[in-house]
Amino acid sequence: MRNTLLIAVREFLDNARTRGFWFGILLVPLIWMVASQVPLLLARKGTPTRHFALIDTSADGRLGAVVSGRLKEVESRRENLRFREWVAPRLRSDQPLSGLDPASRPWERLQQELTPWMKDDAGRFTPPEPLHRRVALSKELEWRGDRGEFEARLRDWMREDRTFRPEGSDREVSLFAVAILEEDPASNAPPSLRFWSVNQADTQLRERMGEALSREFRRREYARLGMDPVVVDQVEKGQARVIGLDPRKAAGEERVGAADLLRQWAPSAFVYLLWIAVFGVSQMLLNSLIEERSNRILEVLMSSVTPLELMAGKLVGVAAVGTVMALAWIGSLVLVTFWMIHTSGAAALAPDSMVTRLPIELATLLGDSWLLPAFGLYFLLGYLFYAGVILALGSTCNDLKEAQNFTGVIALLMMVPLVSITFIPKDPNGPVATVLSWIPPYTPFVMMNRVAAHPPMLEVIGTLVLLVVSDIVVLWACARIFRIAVLRTGQPASLAQLLRWVLGR
């Protein structure tokens, strides 16, 4: 036992001193941070203002006014929401803003009303650059009433990616899109939108224009049929109340809320962490074994310890490394979440919003569920299973190149839980999830994904017993292979030879 502990400590310290260990610890928190902040940053600053031109061929210019009005409405709402984000940390005290509806007041009026409660150095809010800005076409693209002739000139212009200086602008801009609005007054057909743009991936402007035209067509049709458009609009805004109820919850608490959705999908995130931890730590164990085998360090160690002590020490030492990494990842996830909430000013914006309640719901979920204990248990059992397989195969390889042939197959085997990671929460007790739970290589990941869905206790205990027995069998077979192959040189053993070693032949 003493030799096993010494090897375990040595293995842990050897891995903890490497840059890869600290890189692995810091990489996941960095991914959390990037995943939470980069989309917001790109949404705010990553996309430049799109300059577009609007050609309204309708007789009274009504279509152009409708489209422009819709774009201004969306932009005004965006400015008001940005103002709420800006003003939250500049209030002198926690003034709730939930009663201030951004759609009911422009941000200029909101700033006036909140001035007495703002800090002295708050300054003035600067509205963001608009997402879309309408510009007048240059003289070369002037509309002359002939659509075919105009589109021919427009096609050549946009293909060359030419720039021009719009009226009132002090810089050259490129033309993102040109929208041609058409309608046939003699028919009741909906208006059409011919949207010219070299960037068809950004569909936001096109969709908003199409939505405005569709809404205007419906309003016009209601009026033609003698229906009051205002009344129809009020009716269309009505929505049925949908209330989700969970029969498994206590009486009076059956209503399903955001916390229940978090409870349903949180295990998927833990499954992903579990997969990374098990595969990454097992790969770390393999690299350590191959390196010591290539450098003849194993021969020195084997002069003082038995193969079983060496194998057990390596398993325990690398397991400790994986435990530290997993704890650091989970801790960083919680810290990043709380940091986001603390710096966003969400409590002042809307005290009852999901963003504000997220850390509370997450803490409650971790406190009254089996997520964390299950993660620790399935990490340990999953690690022992895959580490035993990798250690047995790695002991037969002379270099890392040979070992990679085996790890590639194991990686493909471990891809099944990742493929099913989003399917299982939708049917956690269905036939697919149940069958995969009873396959030992997949049991840790699938049962981790099902833990919040309260699977039958018989399946929980049965799969756990099966996994423990599988670990014992794998480690026993690994010990028999490791004892023979650890100091063996030459060609890697075949599968038939490995089987003979396991059976003691």
Image (spheres, rainbow, N blue to C red):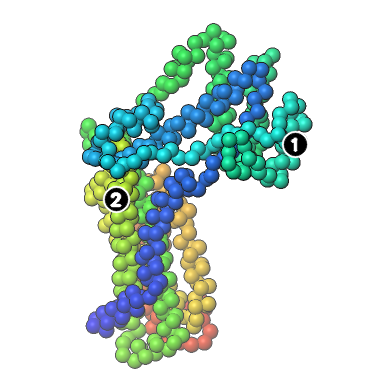
User: Which residue, as the protein is rendered here, is positioned at the far top?
Assistant: 226
Location of the C terminus (image quadrant): bottom left
Mark closer to the observer (2, 1): 1
Res 465 → quadrant: bottom left
Rendered location of residue 216, percent (x, y): 56, 20
Res 189 → quadrant: top right
Q: Amino acid at mark 2?
A: Phe
Res 338 label: 2
**Vertical position of residue 497 compared to residue 471: above or below:** below
Rendered location of residue 481, percent (x, y): 41, 79
Rendered location of residue 326, percent (x, y): 33, 63
- Compared across the picture, whether 230 is left or right of 462 comes to right
Which residue is located at x 41 percent, y 83 percent? 292
Residue sitting nearer the eye, 426 or 272:
272
Which residue is located at x 39 percent, y 87 percent? 298
Rendered location of residue 178, percent (x, y): 65, 34
- Compared across the picture, whether 455 is left or right of 395 comes to left
**Vertical position of residue 255 compared to residue 163: above or below:** above
- Compared across the picture, whether 340 is left or right of 293 comes to left
Residue hosting label 1: 153
Which residue is located at x 41 percent, y 23 percent? 239
**Vertical position of residue 60 compared to residue 446: above or below:** above
Q: Amino acid at mark 1?
A: Arg
Residue sitting nearer the eye, 358 or 245:
358
Residue sitting nearer the eye, 464 or 81:
81
Q: Mark 2 falls on what kind of element?
A: helix
Res 323 → quadrant: bottom left
- Compared across the picture, whether 154 is left or right of 299 comes to right
